[in-house]
């Protein structure tokens, strides 16, 4: 079963609740594969500057974009453990999109490619803002006892940081940087 198959099954279930929901193993697999793709997307950001092919950079962005529309209903867990990952994945898609659009802008050689740069940046900015907003809301309403992982509970109690604080921080920094760019 591929990542696309899992997403398709999730979409069918969301569109028609009579459709078979994802089995527990499929929910876990969707969660794990999405997490790996998110980590890879965040890693790709560091290497985009070495890529000299406009279409390859766009392909990297499209791969990250697959993460942005995963619904938490199709994931295991409850509460923040279930709703935080999709918001973090939106932040990942946004960060990859902003970095990709910067690189694509440097590589763009036609009017069509420059239009695509604008599309990617605008779409990435929306995902970034949406993910940051959702994570910020979760952060404000989540108590240490609501977290599933003992490590996350410990981190909140000792250091006062939530597991998704890094995503919020990176997202806000990037949005601030985008807002300072000349239009």
Image: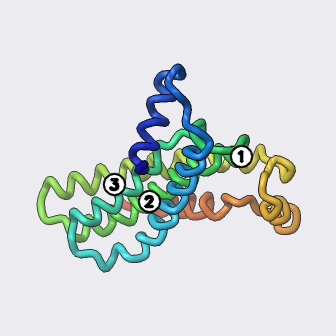
Res. 27 image quadrant? top right
Residue at 50% in and 43% down: 70
The span from disc 2 to disc 1 (Cα, nearest Å) is 28 Å
Query: Mark number for residue 62?
Result: 3
Expressed as whole percent of the image width and height from the top left, the position of residue 175 reads 50, 57
The mark that comes first in sequence, 2 or 1, is 1
The mark that comes first in sequence, 3 or 1, is 3
Q: Which residue is mark 1?
A: 80
Expressed as whole percent of the image width and height from the top left, the position of residue 87 reads 57, 48
User: Regarding mark 2 in the picture, which secondary structure is present there?
Assistant: helix
Locate residue 115 relative to residue 142 in the image: left or right: left
Closer to viewer: mark 3 or mark 2: 3
Q: Nearer the viewer, residue 98 or 145?
A: 145
Q: Nearer the viewer, residue 21 or 64?
A: 21
Q: Which residue is mark 2?
A: 178
Expressed as whole percent of the image width and height from the top left, the position of residue 51 reads 28, 75
The span from disc 3 to disc 1 (Cα, nearest Å) is 27 Å
**Residue that lies at the very extreme toward the bottom in this rendered image:** 50
């Amino acid at each position: 079963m591929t990542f696309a198959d899992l997403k398709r099954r999730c979409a069918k279930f969301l569109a028609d609740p009579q459709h078979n929901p994802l089995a527990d193993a499929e929910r876990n697999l969707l969660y794990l594969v999405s997490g790996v793709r998110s980590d890879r997307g965040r890693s790709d950001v560091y290497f985009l500057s070495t890529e000299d092919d406009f279409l390859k950079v766009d392909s990297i962005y499209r791969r990250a974009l697959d993460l942005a529309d995963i619904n938490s209903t199709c994931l295991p867990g409850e509460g923040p453990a279930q709703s935080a990952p999709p918001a973090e994945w939106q932040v990942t898609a946004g960060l990859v999109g902003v970095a990709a659009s910067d690189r694509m802008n440097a590589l763009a050689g036609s009017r069509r490619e420059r239009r695509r740069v604008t599309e990617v940046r605008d779409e990435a900015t929306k995902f970034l803002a949406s993910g940051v907003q959702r994570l910020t809301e979760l952060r404000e309403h989540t108590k240490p006892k609501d977290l599933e992982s003992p490590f996350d509970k410990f981190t909140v109690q000792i250091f006062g940081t939530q597991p998704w604080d890094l995503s919020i921080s990176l997202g806000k920094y990037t949005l601030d940087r985008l807002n300072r760019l000349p239009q």
